Amino acid sequence: MMATRKLILRFPPELVEEPVTYHLVKDFGLMVNILRASISPGKQGRLVVAVTGEEPDLQKGLGYLKRMGLEAEPMAEEILRHEALCTSCTACIPACPTGALEVDRTTWLVSLDKEKCVLCGSCVPVCPYRAMEIRYNGSA
Amino acid sequence: MLRSIDEINRKIREGRVVVCTAEEIIHLAREKGAAKAAREVDVVTTGTFSPMCSSGAFLNLRQPKEKIKLGGGTVSLDGVPAYSGFAAADICIGATALPEGSAKNSPHPGSFPRGGAHVIEALVAGRKVKLRGTAHGTDCYPGTRREEEIGLCDMNEAFLFNPRNCYQNYNVGVNLSDKTIYTYMGVLRPHLGNANYCSAGQLSPLLNDPYYRTIGIGTRIFLGGGVGYVAWNGTQHSPGQPRTERGIPRRASGTLALVGDMKQMTPHWVRAVSFTGYGTSLALGIGVPIPILDEAVMQHVCVTDADIPAPVVDYSRHYPFSEGSGPLAEVTYAQLKSGAIELQGKTVPTGSLSSYAKAREIAEILKKWIGQGTFQLTEKAASLPGTEGGDA
């Protein structure tokens, strides 16, 4: 059975140039979708990925990351929709590429399906009421 | 004529008034016919909740022991400059004013986290803001500096004034260029990436009274959670726009100037807005009752989203540089609300800046107020400029 894990990978400076995602794809047959990346040579890097594959392959892939000395934490907080701030105006609806933000066209209320969210962040600047926030592990 | 406003108010006082929202009436009239619906229903309530930059708060501050004349001096609230060119203690803060030293649009696009609208929102929410004022000092007003935390409770009067609100129809914003643009119609993605509209359509006040028969100067309304009034026609009131057969303007046309007591308002209905790359604005809840004086008034309140065409305008060239000979297309609110429109062979997803859910909630609240007898209707004191005049 296929499963998806959203992970935050923290690279120590010496591993920044390691082709980690290549190995996850090539050696373990995993699908890797990069959601966010901040990596610069010589500095600590951070990669937010959604990794999809068969459970045994996922385990092997995670084992590989551990052996390489990479910290891989599951994504804890992902996206926040501050309901008290949201007016259900729908400005975010055309910006959301996956349909995670949706409007019920009977009640006209906007809802968020976190499972569908890929953390692209498109909804954050388009919300006039600042109701959308992307929060990573450990960030306030 | 079926009934006068006096008769409606008597029914309100006696608890016999029949009220429907502008959405409910569509179904009722479809079921019973407009003539019968007009006989049965006394009042139809409308509502809208949208950002509108043309909003400001007039505040009158209580004088300290050593009096000070802020008129001719300077004043800021939470660092946002306010206007003080009035008498000693009257100031005005506009929704789009930005704090001194604001990064604005550098780097582009700026996020505009705070502005005059946020000060207004804070005051309505019962919070105190930091007042800083300077004056030149006179024999009768010796003070030259004023610095204190103030809230609405420290003010004699505080009223919100909208030089322009309740736009009767408006543009649908799109972007034909190859880069994202940041506008008061929201973020518009390149190559017709999205189409943003901003009207409650069939619930919007002036679209339910297209010729301003009942809405006029002096009309009592729901404003920001309290009671307000139509003060005047709004700025840029332009009733002479082309209209559909049933009188709906096909372009942005009529507007209202509104006024209301901020001390009655609630934070739920007075919300600061930050448009990325553009600036701050204020979203206000507004509800206007329409007395069903006769069948013609009823015909107008039965307007549906499918009856209201809106112009689609390119905000990359046409709007900013006044290019092009007219809108790219016309689409109805029914099409806009379906989630996508067809434009130049593309399916373009739509989004709204105006909350239909909130517009509906406001129409329901106003209906409840009228039904409970706490809100009576007013006769307009004067009519708004109509289709015979104005800026065509």
Image (cartoon, rainbow, N blue to C red):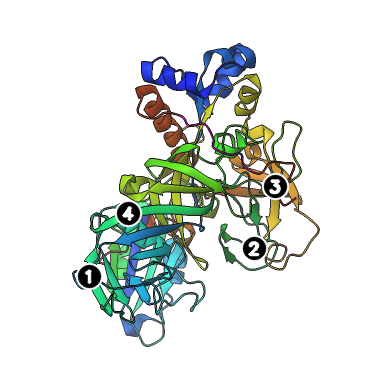
Q: Which labelled disc corresponds to residue B190?
A: 2
- Sequence-wise, the earlier of marks 1 and 4 is 1
In the rendered structure, which segment of residues is drawn in magenta? Answer: B377-384
Q: Residues within 10 Å of mark 2 (few under 14, many from 20)?
A: some
- Measured Cα–Cα span from mark 2 to mark 3: 24 Å
Which quarter of the figure has residue B361? top left
The residue at 45%/52% (across/down) is: B283
Mark 3 — residue?
Answer: B251
Q: Amino acid at mark 2?
A: Pro
> In the rendered picture of this protein, how many numbered marks are placed on residues?
4
Instruction: Give the mark toward the camera: 3 or 4.
Output: 4
Q: Amino acid at mark 3?
A: Arg
* Same chain shared by disc 2 and disc 1: yes
| Disc 4 element | strand
| Nearer-N-terminus badge (2/1) | 1
Does residue A83 appear in this view? Answer: no
Q: Earlier in the sequence, mark 2 or mark 4?
A: 4
Mark 2 belongs to chain: B
Q: Sequence order check: which comes first, mark 3 or mark 1?
A: 1
Classed neighbour count for the residue bearing mark 3: other residues with Cα under 10 Å, few (<14), some (14–19), many (≥20)? many
**Of label 3 and label 4, which has the lower sequence position?**
4
Instruction: Indicate which label's residue lies in the foreground, 2 or 1.
Output: 1
Q: Chain of mark 3?
A: B
- Dividing the picture into quarters, in which one does residue B67 lie? bottom left
The residue singled out by tag 1 in the image is B148
Measured in 3D between alpha carbons, the distance from the residue under mark 2 to the one under mark 1, in whole angstroms, is 47 Å
- Callout in the foreground (2, 4): 4
SS for callout 2:
loop
Give amino acid for label 1.
Glu
Nearer to us of marks 3 and 1 is 1
For disc 4, the marked residue is B157
Q: Amino acid at mark 4?
A: Glu
